Image (cartoon, coloured by chain):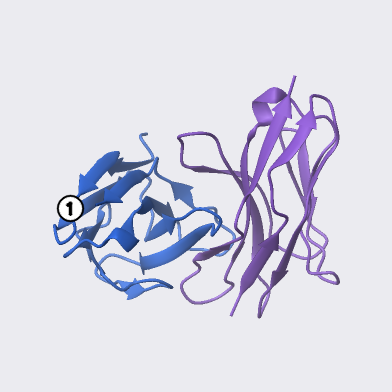
Amino acid sequence: GDSVTQMEGPVTLSEEAFLTINCTYTATGYPSLFWYVQYPGEGLQLLLKATKADDKGSNKGFEATYRKETTSFHLEKGSVQVSDSAVYFCALSESTGRRALTFGSGTRLQVQP
Amino acid sequence: NAGVTQTPKFQVLKTGQSMTLQCAQDMNHNSMYWYRQDPGMGLRLIYYSASEGTTDKGEVPNGYNVSRLNKREFSLRLESAAPSQTSVYFCASSARDSYDEQFFGPGTRLTVL
């Protein structure tokens, strides 16, 4: 079945550092890809998405490119802030059927001042 | 718009007790989902409902039942709670398209003693 693998955390960075969180996937068909963010004590919020190969999703300075050849969707940000501290989930959506999300295990990011 | 709401926020049960988690959305979405979140495992799909009047099992349905009461509401019932059901439960909804994001509720933290 479909699966998502993302790098384990926690990832600890200093403010203004460059961020990369790796995500790779296995899927049949042509899934849509998502990054969700979960702040402490809250539900998940969509950060960005990409619906086809070579699409780049972007939001709030974060970017990720849908790479079909490497089955990857790595999350990047050029300069992180303390307020970016959260858990980040990579996910894919089935292209047919129930359209449920398959999630990676999550990566906790801690940004220090 | 309230988005997706869930009640209760916290609950402690004893083994064998029953309870119902409530979820409602005001976005006129067709599809609704129940996930559980466990440490290091991301979110896993329990049940979903593609439209009013239909429900189907997800990845981890054992020990749960659901009811899609109407288009707005989708409840999750634990008939006889077990410690293995200690988790954080999230309800989500979407407009039923693989390109569409899922909107998540704030979650219910359940502890079964």
Residue B49 visible in the displayed image: no
Q: Relative to B71, say whether A107 is above or below.
A: above
User: Which quadrant of the structure image shows residue A92?
Assistant: bottom right
Image chain in purple: A
Q: Quadrant of residue A5 in the image?
A: bottom right
- Name the residue beneath numbered marker 1: B14
Along the horizontal axis of the image, is B94 left or right of B34?
right
**B98 up-or-down from B87: above or below:** below
**Residue A71: image location, x then y, percent:** 78, 69
Q: Which chain is blue?
A: B
- For the point 77% across and 55% down, which residue is it? A22
> Which residue is most to the left?
B17
Q: Position of residue A75 (x, y in %)?
A: 76, 48
Image quarter in which the N terminus of chain B is found = top left
Frontmost residue, A88 versus B52? A88
The image shows a total of numbered marks equal to: 1
Residue B11 screen position, x and y as percent: 24, 43
